[in-house]
């Protein structure tokens, strides 16, 4: 009789354990945000002139060291520059070119270029995703008149597309952002 009770309890326990549905049969794919330590924007003047490089590099991520932000020179008033973004994960050796992942997942990413502090520049997207929405891996910057200020470049992961061109309107999560001190002469 003891064996019968023991078998009954074990059978009931196995029914409870194995009758629950398994929600992991078809788990949603996880698309983790990219690790980006270095963002470089190279601005090449249309026609002739010297390219200007904007770069932020933060090799310790959220560590105690601040990112190193550099601007290689001044923009020239009345000049349009073709911009190209490069993103790296330098925590790996060799460094991973995250730009390729952004290209592959362009529908899930968008750069935003925001001039502030009196900087007289305009920006425009030169690329788009498969749905015709802007991405920003390539773009233009037109330096209008002599001025100084800042340009903030932000990469958003999974923004609403289309959006109104603002960070608030786009939503999503920030993969990387940096503010550069710019002079137009």
Image: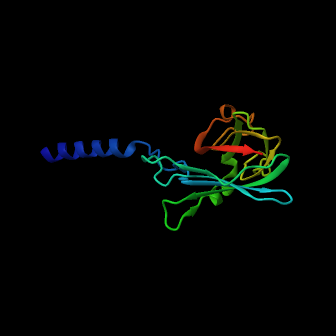
x then y, percent, for residue 55: 62, 53
Q: Residue at x 24, y 46 (%)?
A: 10
x then y, percent, for residue 109: 66, 47
Spot the residue most to the left.
Answer: 2
x then y, percent, for residue 159: 66, 40
Which of the 4 image quadrants contains residue 111? top right
Q: Name the foreground residue: 16 vs 121.
A: 121
In the image, residue 128 above or below residue 163:
below
Question: Visible in this render: residue 74?
Answer: yes
In the image, residue 73 above or below residue 151:
below
Spot the residue most to the front.
Answer: 185
x then y, percent, for residue 106: 69, 51
Q: Name the foreground residue: 116 vs 172.
A: 116
Question: Visible in this render: residue 1?
Answer: no
The image quadrant where one finds the C terminus is top right
The answer to whether residue 24 is left or right of residue 51 is: left
Which of the 4 image quadrants contains residue 167? top right
Q: Name the foreground residue: 89 vs 131.
A: 89
Q: Residue at x 33, y 41 (%)?
A: 16
Which of the 4 image quadrants contains residue 1? top left
The answer to whether residue 62 is left or right of residue 150 is: left
Q: Residue at x 44, y 46 (%)?
A: 22
Number of marks present in the image shown: 0
């Amino acid at each position: 009789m003891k064996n019968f009770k023991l078998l009954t309890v074990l059978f009931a326990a196995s029914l409870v354990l194995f009758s629950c549905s398994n929600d992991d049969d078809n788990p949603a794919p996880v698309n983790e945000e990219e690790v980006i330590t270095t963002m470089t924007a190279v601005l090449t003047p249309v026609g002739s002139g010297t390219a200007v490089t904007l770069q932020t590099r933060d090799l310790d991520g959220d560590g105690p060291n601040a990112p190193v932000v550099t601007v290689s020179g001044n923009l020239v008033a009345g000049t349009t520059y073709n911009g190209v973004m490069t993103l790296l994960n330098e925590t790996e050796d060799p460094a991973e070119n995250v730009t390729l992942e952004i290209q592959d997942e362009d529908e899930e990413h968008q750069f935003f270029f925001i001039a502030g502090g009196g900087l007289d520049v305009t920006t425009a997207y030169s690329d788009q995703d498969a749905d015709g929405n802007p991405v920003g891996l390539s773009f233009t910057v037109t330096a209008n008149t002599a001025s100084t200020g800042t340009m903030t470049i932000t990469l958003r992961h999974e923004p609403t597309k289309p959006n109104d061109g603002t960070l608030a309107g786009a939503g999503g999560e920030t993969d990387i952002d940096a503010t550069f001190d710019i002079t137009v002469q």
